[in-house]
Image (cartoon, coloured by chain):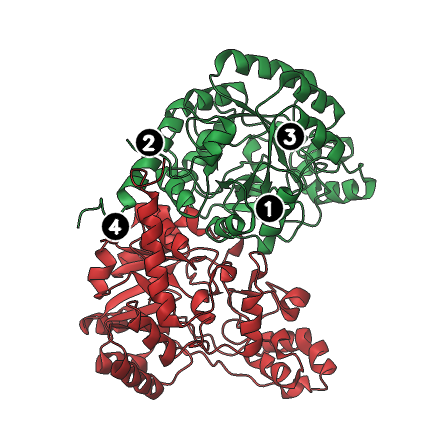
Chain colours: A red, B green
Amino acid sequence: MSQWPDRRLLDLFGLQQPILQAPMAGSSGVDLAVAVSRGGGLGALPCALLRPDDVQRQVAEYRQAAPGPLNLNFFCHQQSPPDEAAQAMWLRRLSPYYRELGLDPSAAPTGAGRAPFDADYCAVVEAVRPEVVSFHFGLPDLALLDRVKATGARVISSATTVAEAVWLADHGCDAVIAMGLEAGGHRGSFLTDNMSAQPGLMALLPQVVDAVNLPIIAAGGIADGRGLAAAFALGAAGVQVGTAYLKSPQSLVTDAHRQALAQASDDGTALTNLFTGRPARGIINRLMAEIGPLSPDAPAFPHAAAALGPLRSASPTPQDFTPLWSGQAAALAQPMDAEALTRRLAADGLAVLAKLSGTLAPA
Amino acid sequence: MSQWPDRRLLDLFGLQQPILQAPMAGSSGVDLAVAVSRGGGLGALPCALLRPDDVQRQVAEYRQAAPGPLNLNFFCHQQSPPDEAAQAMWLRRLSPYYRELGLDPSAAPTGAGRAPFDADYCAVVEAVRPEVVSFHFGLPDLALLDRVKATGARVISSATTVAEAVWLADHGCDAVIAMGLEAGGHRGSFLTDNMSAQPGLMALLPQVVDAVNLPIIAAGGIADGRGLAAAFALGAAGVQVGTAYLKSPQSLVTDAHRQALAQASDDGTALTNLFTGRPARGIINRLMAEIGPLSPDAPAFPHAAAALGPLRSASPTPQDFTPLWSGQAAALAQPMDAEALTRRLAADGLAVLAKLSGTLAPA
């Protein structure tokens, strides 16, 4: 029987397979998390766009249907107040699109939309006791983190550099996600905003493994069994997979997003701050091509998002103004049921690992 | 006995180990190539900065000392003529540095320095008959390429995207280098100049393997046995290693460059066009931090280079104006003799591969 060469993460989280579903706020919900759990991986519920009572309801649904542990995911950015000057600059930048669609920029909405982890969310964690709590953009304040850890939850977060991984280990994480440049969605960066220096996973992962004495979860560009095997070769104890699950029927992506993923190429994405104010990887669309992908005119996270809503609603091609989150390996993933995909990833990963041993290979 | 799980590249090139030394113009010469060959890898002589008769002399030295095959490397960019307006713009951009060092910008030199593959170089190839000829920035014109192939040389080149890999396969390459974003020095890009969309190796490599029915050589961020094993897991038949060899005593880097490599971090490099006009990855230094890393003011390749010479000569800290080429995994490499490093990489790679087989792993 084949087995994983590193069992630390399996034991830490109580998993059958060392596969974490990436929590993807807005693109994944209970159905995807349950399917991944049924496949033996770690299902995750992204909470950044949910109110605390919605979180509680989704957890109840998950617990009814999922056989395995649960990862509740929160953003923990410092919420910046709305900045009128920045908003005005942003609306000036977007005004050609408002005019094109016959909209009035002065009526553009504001608002944050994405809430950071706070006492209300923490009370839900204490009530529902997820096995794993993951954070994005660092970790919350020590008082909140202590309350989370007191529930017995394992705490993880994403590092985009070695320095961030060391910081997370020093601040109490039980495992660290090494997030390569390839990954889709928001960068987890919290100690750097220099996107031109972000390392690819091939370089980042072994350097994080050397620097941090914790199980490391590899993320970014992993969408088939070869990626799983490579991650273990580089020293990871498990992987986090996002984009491949977006192609499953259980994801919540729009038809346009699903179609863009089906046609994705290796060099069709870029990091952009246009959709929220923070850099995130998505398929290059009209807005990114015309005023981005990274623009100093986008206001601070998450205040860029609200003004795009009217463009999305009014446009005959809303995908021009919608983030089409994707990593760089969308083309590797087969569109299939998320439970079956989880089993396939695990089986293929083990098969690649077995074949790599020279003693087993054909001469 | 352990063995490599894929022997295609070993057989194609007649190698003991599936390790190619990256040809690094200006930073490597005969000594490094010979040492790599003695270690069982493929030694390479970069020719872009050499006159044809210098190439011939270096090949003779290599043949006397190296036990294995030889890779002769050439640039094959379209040589653009000097552009006075672009040069004037560039000197305006550099003028604060000229003034700071008491230099006269109007006396700045011009000149190309890096010559593309042409009939004279081709005559040398026909005379010295290297086993492998590698190109950077695509492939030369068909007439020249046909002459190279008629010598019996295996032809390879670098792809930074799947589209480039397919193009190289369609145009007669015998193997293709998949060059991840992590790699140091000049990007091999020739069908794209969109640096914000370049894929990391974890995503690029398996997509190239799927698209091209040739042995694929993985490059970028590979500096120890884990990287070798990961490359084979992703489907590569061999690896190309550059930065790790820069740390060997056989490289030609300056003391300042060597010191920068010794202190390198995972997130201390960026792609810059300031030093030659084409994007290349180097350790972030003063010039990159202040006017780059990518600037529209740098003239077309290779015309950016000449004007930096006087700054380098006059500055008490010439590394401020010198490219410190490096990939993102410099910190993984031990500074050691290049022959020993080649043997170590191979042995460590095989050891990682053997350990990855679940049937051999401790429970």
Residue matched to label 4: A5
Q: Chain of mark 3?
A: B
Q: Is residue B115 visible?
A: no
Q: Position of residue B140 (x, y in %)?
A: 71, 35
Q: Are marks 1 and 2 in contact (CB under 8 Å)?
A: no
Q: Nearer the viewer, residue A16 or A217?
A: A16
B301, above or below A125, in the image: above
Residue at point 46%, 39% (across, down): B237
Q: Mark number for residue A155?
A: none
Residue type at mark 4? Pro
Label 3 in the same subunit as label 1: yes
Q: Position of residue A121 (x, y in %)?
A: 31, 80
A46, above or below B204, in the image: below
Q: Mark number for residue B74?
A: 3
User: How dense is the environment of label 3, judged by Cα within 10 Å: few (below 14), some, or many (20 and up)?
Assistant: many
Instruction: Find numbered disc 4 in the image and state the secondary structure of the residue it sits on.
Output: loop
Spatial CA span between label 4 and label 1: 33 Å
Instruction: Find numbered disc 3 in the image and state the secondary structure of the residue it sits on.
Output: strand
Spatial CA span between label 3 and label 1: 18 Å
Label 2 in the same subunit as label 3: yes
Spatial CA span between label 1 and label 2: 29 Å
